[in-house]
Image: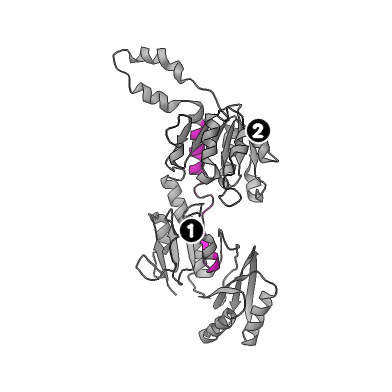
Amino acid sequence: MSFEIQTYNNIAEEGLKRFRNATYTIDTGAEPDGIMLRSQNLHETTFPASVKGIARAGAGVNNIPVESCTSQGIVVFNTPGANANAVKELVLASLLLSVRPILKGATWVQTLTGTDIDKQVEKEKKQFSGFELEGKKLGVVGLGAIGAMIANDAYRLGMDVVGYDPFVSVDTAWNISRRVRRALTLDEVFRECDFITIHVPLNDKTRHLISTKELQLMKNNATLLNFARGELVDNQALVEGINNQTIKEYITDFASEELLHHPQITVLPHLGASTSEAEINCAKSASRNLKLFLETGNIQHSVNFPAVELAFHSPYRLAIFHKNVPNMLGAISSTAADLGMNIDNLINRSRDEIAYTLLDLSETDITKINALQTAVSALNDVIRIRIIKHQEEN
């Protein structure tokens, strides 16, 4: 069994080296089994039938047609948390820059001339005075990997931290300091906080999460930070809000024409995950997810299919993508029994309207395995089915 991997963008070698063995080829032009990418837009891409999985070396998957992939039985992976530290550090740096005009001061010093620069600095430095983060209130909207780290470190800076996330996981809850207070509503965060940073995924429910109504709830001296996705904030409402002194300042990592050249808006060139460490971590995590899936059918960190893990010891395994409908497992099991095959192990997990089943078989005759694949494929509501042969090196 061999696999072809197609790459887009520059994927760190530390990730690609997982595929540098006899089982894999990379970018040979053959039909790919897996795709690895960072920012490449795949929405206009027609995927060949060979594609089984797409791994994004990063958290966001807005550049991938996830819904279309789901309908084709293509698993889409991301790497939540792999770039969390890089984004966290940039958010903290932006918080510091928002209260201390460091960049303006440094730029001004470069304009000085003469032999008494030290005296000029002492005379004019008051224009660059700021204030401190200690004692100010930070609202963190979204307590995933990034939000939780920001909440903890902001508390260590002396800030009063309020977190909001109705879907916070058990793992995240364990990692958040007890001193981070939980807000029960978004409105509570908007009304109370001096600084608000948002760290939620972009979807139909969160698009323009912050618009005119939300801005009007905020303090007129509040600073809003957005290092998650640009579309979470209604830019037109944001500019109007700043011009009307509804809020004080906006700092974002997502460039847009209407945000440029405004003295109270700082736009960074999408630097959140732009560290060598983050790129390496994301590449390693993405390759690990994709490799595990191709070789065993196990799914970790997928955005469109359920997480499934089953130890693989049998000669063959069927990986079955199907709709989440009643009696599907019964139909699959009956089909195997009708062909005289013994099921060694089975696991089924669902996610909304989609389900995924791994079926381990003691059968070693590939002709019979192919016959089972054909029979199961003919069942109603089956989307896709793969045969995976056990390999000792797995």
Q: Which amino acid, mark 2? A: Arg
Residue pointed to by mark 2: 191
Q: Position of residue 171 (x, y in %)?
A: 64, 50
Q: Which mark is residue 64?
A: 1
User: In the image, which residues are magenta?
Assistant: 70-95
Count of marks, rendered view:
2
Disc ID at residue 166: none
Image quadrant where residue 324 sits = bottom right
- Whether residue 328 sits left or right of residue 259 in the image: it is right
Q: In the image shown, does 71 or 308 lie closer to the viewer?
A: 71
Cβ–Cβ under 8 Å for marks 2 and 1: no
Is residue 300 positioned above or below 391 on the image? Answer: above
Q: Is residue 202 magenta?
A: no
Residue 143 pos. (x, y %):
61, 44
At a point 70% along the width and 75% down the height, the residue shown is 327
Position of residue 28 relative to residue 179, above or below, is below
